[in-house]
Amino acid sequence: MRQILLIVLAAAISRPLGATDAGSFVALCYHEVTGDTPEAYSSTAISVRDLAAQFAWLQANGYHPVSIEAIVASRNGGPALPEHAILLTFDDGLASVHQRVFPLLKLFKYPAVVAPVGSWMDLAPNESVSYGEGQVSGAAFVSWSQLREMQQSGLVEVASHSYRLHLGLVGNPMGNVEPAAITRVYADGRYETDDAYVGRLRADLGRAREQMLGHMQVAPRVMVWPYGRSNRTSQQVAASLGMPVGLTLEDGVNTPQTPLATLRRHLVQNPMALTALAEILRQTWPSDPRRSVRIDPGDWPVAGEARLSVTLEQLVALKPNLVFISPRQGDAAHQATLFPTARLPMRADLLNRIGWQIESRAGAAVYVDLPADWLGDMDLVGDLARQVNLSGLSVPLVPGSMAAEQLRHAAERWRWPIHLVYVMQGLPDPGLWSRLPDDDWIRLPARDDVLAGLPDAARGHVMLQFDATRLTPATARQMRALKARGFGDFAIDGLPTAVPDEVRREFSLRDEPRP
């Protein structure tokens, strides 16, 4: 499903990569490798010429591809990983991995992970499956004998990419198709239960395991999650079936503290020049600044498609990369949710549809503004994460507090990873900035007293929020001054129908200078 893959890319707020610390490594995720002229199946394809050039560049610049075995051993008291360690992975089991990649692996003596999809391996040559931009036949995929040849070389570890989870399933009454490994199937007017969901995962991953054991005489220990999407429940299922190592599509460096179940990978796309590869590995540019708006669909019509369409047009025009959403109508005294739950009345089952459309059409990650009166209800937060496509929560809590981590844990049972945005009204204790968990940050009002007191340590960890009803040329000047100080993460508390041109130029990622 090309749309799902694009959503994975759009939703990610990337961190710079680099593996210079002891025990750290960067993982690269490849898919199809074409010849020099044929059309690619998808946007993730690269040419064999480019791949050879990348391998040569890695070799010439002191990068060292390592195996899963070396990574696991380094965690268990074995030899340390070399400096500038790299993990090479090739997803989907396309025929090009044997035809074009394997000769290069042998030439450079590079280890790699290859992850075929079980159901695609079972296709007859005259059968086809949806892939990338269209349909491909069973002949497009590697054979079991070719996989055995690669495995027996000692260079290739064959991982599971599921049996039939590399697809989308209907995830709400409006018919949105979402990644199978994390989606509650909606059919016949009801959602899949917890037991049915876990049973579906276990049956699928178990079938892929037995299939590989039968053909390869070795069961997989690595689970490569389709579209990079998983949750704590699916990770536990994989581990119980002998696959404690999991590969995602979260950007970033894998440090010795990164759990083996959720290793990060950077998706290689076409085209990727050598300069782009070097920029990834050498951290030569910072990640995009965070720019967010907030919407409140609680008062939208129950059949809110017209309002959603207008909202999407506004988001596409303004181009934030984060959207904060209210999950309910009303307040603590009189409230109704926008998602199914037994904890409160439901106004309408809209939130999953809204969140998915924002990711797929506007390219923004979705964060839910958690009401203060929900902070102690872990079952309610679990229901929210079970039913709604989201990347994080904003919470009026102190960073790193037990209450915040309990919320994260409750949500990550069904959505992983969950990033937290801590909503505060004034500057925190100065020492707190260095204690913020990775990928979390603080949202503060852009008041004069807050801006004057921002310490250097807050750079990259604070989002400054501006009032949507008071955007003026002075706001633009304020944003420019903050950027000059190294504070470029901005929020607008709302989604204004009209934004002054000066503010739009400073806020919109369409106008953000690129290195």
Image: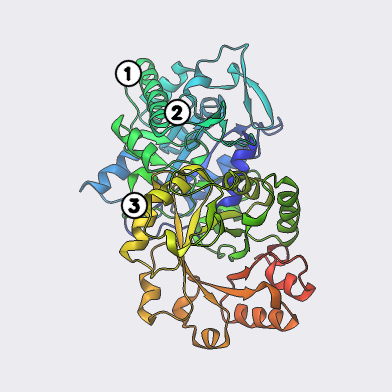
**Residue under numbered circle 2:** 162
Residue 166 got which mark?
none
Q: Residues within 10 Å of mark 3 (few under 14, many from 20)?
A: many
Dot 3 corresponds to which residue? 82
User: In the visual, does 393 lie left or right of 297?
Assistant: left
Residues at discs 1 and 2 in contact (Cβ within 8 Å): no
Quadrant housing residue 275: bottom right
Q: Nearer the viewer, residue 20 or 121?
A: 121
Could one spot residue 52 in this view of the protein? yes
Nearer-N-terminus badge (1/3)? 3
Residue at coordinates 31% horizontally, 54% vertically from top-left?
Answer: 256
Residue that lies at the very extreme toward the front in this rendered image: 334
Q: Secondary structure at mark 2?
A: loop
Badge 2 or badge 3: first in the primary sequence: 3
Q: Amino acid at mark 3?
A: Pro
> Which sits earlier in the primary sequence, circle 1 or circle 2?
2
- Residue 314 pos. (x, y %): 74, 58
Q: Verify CB contact (< 8 Å) between mark 1 and mark 3.
A: no
Tell me how far mark 1 sits from mark 3, CA to CA: 31 Å
Dot 3 falls on a residue whose secondary structure is: loop
Residue placed under numbered mark 1 in the picture: 217
Across and down, in percent, residue 381 comes to 43, 51
Residue 331 appears left or right of 245:
right
Residue 67 visible (yes or no): no
Q: Quadrant of the N terminus?
A: top right
Residue 460 position (above or below residue 334): below
Amino acid tagged 1: Gln
